[in-house]
Amino acid sequence: MFDKILIANRGEIACRIISTARRLGIQTIAVYSEADSNSKHVSMADEAWCIGKPAAAESYLKTDKILDIALKSGAKAIHPGYGFLSENASFAKSCFDNDLIFIGPPVNAIEAMGSKSSAKEIMTEANVPLVPGYHGDDQSVENLLDASKKIGFPVLLKATAGGGGKGMRIVESEDEFAEALASCKREAKASFSDDEVLVEKYLTQPRHIEIQVFSDNFGDTVHLFERDCSVQRRHQKIIEEAPAFGLSDEIRTKIANVAIKAADAIGYSGAGTVEFLYDQDGSFYFMEMNTRLQVEHPVTEMITGLDLVEWQLIVANNQPLPLQQHQIRCHGHAFEVRIYAEDPDQDFLPATGTIVHLNTPEQSLNVRVDTGIRQGDEVSIYYDPMIAKLIVWERDRDTALARLRGTLADYQVVGLTTNLKFLSALAANEAFNMQQIDTSFIEKQQQSLFSEKAPISDESIALAALYILQSRVTQSHLNASVSNDPFSPWHQVTGWRNNEKNSHQLEFIDTESAAPITARIHFEKSGYSIEVNNASYTATGKLDNKQLSANLSGRRIDAQVIEYNDQLHILTHGKSVALGFINDDHQAYSNDESSGLIAPMPGTVISINVKVGDKVTQSQPLLILEAMKMEHTISAPYNGVISEILYQAGDMVEDGAELVIILEDEA
Ligand code: ADP
C-alpha cells in the first residue's frame, strides 16, 4: 500500500479520506486555499500546503501547483475526492505522466463519461436503456426545437458537460423554448465553459435510483446495491437512502446488472455510480455515470459495513477487489441528510456566514456526522455551502427515520441560515414516511414542508426572560465580588429597587414577524413569576455559561442560549427560536426589512428585463443575477412602476445592494 497520499480537496470529503488513510497507516498531505488555512482538513493532515487564493480556480483547481506539491512531498498517489478535479481527465493524465497514481478510474473512462452525450452513445451501443432524447452535434435552435417537438413536451435541456444540477431547464411548451435554451446555454457556459446541450423527455414522476459499482484492474466489477436520491431541490439531492424501498428483487438485480454492464462497457476501475431514472411502471433509464466517489457514499457504507475509501485505495494500489459479489451483503437501512447553509424559504438560496455556535449529535455505530466545519468556521461564497452530512442507520426504514428525527433535533447551528428545520419537517413528513416519493416530492409537499411560521411560543419567551434575569444575577455577583462593599443592596437583582415597584418589564421582538412581545416579571422570594401574553409561569433557573436549566411552573427545561447579532437564540431539543431583545430601556430595534429588490448575495447582473418607466406586475421577473454560478431571478414584489435601475448588465453587486426601485401602485 502507498505510504503517503495527497488529497486534492477540502472540507468534509478531505477529512473523510484522511480518516481512512490514518486508520490504514497512510500519511496524508492536505492542500488548502488562503480561505481555508485554519480549517479542519488542514489540522487533520500530517502535512499541509497552501496552494493559493480562495477562489477555486486559483487554488483547488490549480493542477500544476498540486502536482508540484505531490512530487515535492513524496506522495505516491492523489485522491481527488468529489467535485474539483475528480472528473478531470487531463488532471488524471498529468498524474500518470508524473508517475503519480490518480485514485480514480482510468483516463479514458473519465473521458467516456465526461460528456453526457458521448456517455449516451456508448450506452446505446452497450444496450443500456436511455430516456428518449437528442444528444447530437447540431446545436441550432431550430434543430433542438424540432427534436423537442418530436420527443414531446415537457422536455429537459441539459448541459452535456453539466453536473451538480447546473445548466438544466425544464421546458413545458414550445413558447418557452427559445428563452429556456438561451438561459441554459448561458449557465452552461459560465459553469462548464461549454454551452453544448442535449434534450431529453422530461419524466414527470420518476425516482432517482443509482447503483454503486466497484471495479478492479483485473476485469472484475461488483455492485454495492442501490441508493434512492429522489428528494431533490434544483435537481440536487437533499436526502438519500439505501436500500431503495419497494423494489422487487427482480428489478433490483436487473438494474444492478445493467450498471455493471455500463461500467464494463468503459473498462472501469475504482468507485463509480451509475444513475438511473426509475419510472412508476418499473422501467428505468440510464442517466449518467459519475466516475468518482459520491457525496452520498456513506449510506452504502452503512448498509454494507464496508469502507469505500479503503476499497478505492486497494484498487488504486492494483490489488483485486476485497470481496466477490456473493460476499457483499445489504443489512438494515440508512439515511443521509445534507445540512446546508441555505434558506429553504427563499428557494434554497445559499447562505454565508460564521458558525457562531455548533452542536452535533453524539456519534456512534448508528450515527455518523461527516463534516469539515467546526464552530467558529466561516461558510464563504467561494465553495459549496454544505456544512455537514448526517448519516443514520437502523434495522429498518421506519426505525432509521425515527433515529434521523431524533438526531436532527440535537443538531444546532447558530450564525447563519441553515436547512435544519426543513430537514426535520422532511423527516417527519407523512408522505416521506409512507414512501410516496418521486423527484417532484418537494413541490408536491410544499404545504407541509414550508408551513406558515408559527409565532414564538410563550414558553420560549419566558425562557428568554429567565435567561436575561439569570445573566444579570451572574453579572451582579461578579460586580459585587470586585466592589468595595459586596453586601450592598445595589448589587441585588431580586427585585429590590429604591423607590421602584417589585416588578419589571422586558421587551422582545419576534424576528420573523417583527411583532413586539412583552414579558412582565414579578420578583418573588425565590425566583420570579413571568407573564407573557395570557400565560403565567413561576420560574427559577440556573445559568452555567450558556446552558440554562430552567424550571417553568414545575417543568424542567434545558436550553442553550446564544447571544448573537442583537438576538437571543434559544435552543431546546428539536427547536430553535431567535428573539430580538429591545431590553428594558425601550431602545429602538432596527429591522432591515427587505423589499425583495436587493441582491440576496454577492453576484453579477446578467440581464435586466425592464427599463425606467415600465409598469410591472407582482412576480414579474425584473433581472437575472448570477451568484455562485447559478442564476437567480429577482422578481417584482408588488405592482408598480420602475422608477430607478441602479445597475447594468455585467455589473458586480454586493450582498444587500439595492438593485431596482419600484413605485408601488396605490390601488
Ligand atoms: P447532474 O449531473 O447535474 O446531477 P443529472 O443528469 O444527474 O444532472 O440529473 C439530476 C436530476 O435531475 C435527476 O436526479 C433527476 O431528478 C432530474 N432529471 C434528470 N433527467 C431527467 C429527466 N429526463 N426527466 C425528469 N427528471 C430528470
Image (tube, helix red, strand yellow):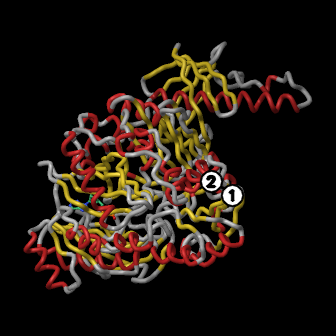
Q: Is residue 664 left or right of residue 154?
A: right
Report the residue at 38% width, 41% height from top. 328
Which quadrant of the figure contains the N terminus? Answer: bottom right
| Residue 529, image x, y percentages | 56, 19
Closer to us: 424 or 575: 424
Q: Is residue 255 above or below residue 431?
A: below
In this view, 88 is above or below 590? below
What amino acid is found at the position of numbered circle 1 in the picture? Asn
Question: Are the residues flagged by discs 1 and 2 in contact, CB closer than 8 Å?
Answer: yes
Viewer-closest of 293 and 447: 293
Task: Give the residue number, with chain letter if any, for mark 1.
Answer: 38
The response on whether ligand 1 sits within 8 Å of label 2 is no
> Label 2: few (<14), some or many (≥20) within 10 Å?
some
Q: Identify the amino acid type marked 2.
A: Asp
> Residue 32, relative to residue 523: is it above or below?
below
Label 1's element?
A: loop
| Relative image position of residue 130 (x, y in whole percent) | 19, 64
Q: Which quadrant of the figure has residue 408?
A: top left
Tell me where residue 484 appears, x and y as whole percent.
Answer: 92, 30
- Of callouts 1 and 2, the N-terminal one: 1
Outermost residue toward the right in this view: 484
The answer, for residue 579, to whether it is visible in the render is: no
Ligand 1, image quadrant it occupies: bottom left
Left or right of 23: which side holds 196? left
For image coordinates 25% across by 43% down, the residue present is 447
Circle 2 sits on which residue? 377
Residue 52 in sight from this viewpoint: yes
Q: Position of residue 438 (x, y in %)?
A: 22, 48
Specify few, some or many for label 1: CA neighbours under 10 Å numbering under 14, 14-19, or 20 or more.
few
Looking at the figure, which quarter contains the C terminus? bottom left
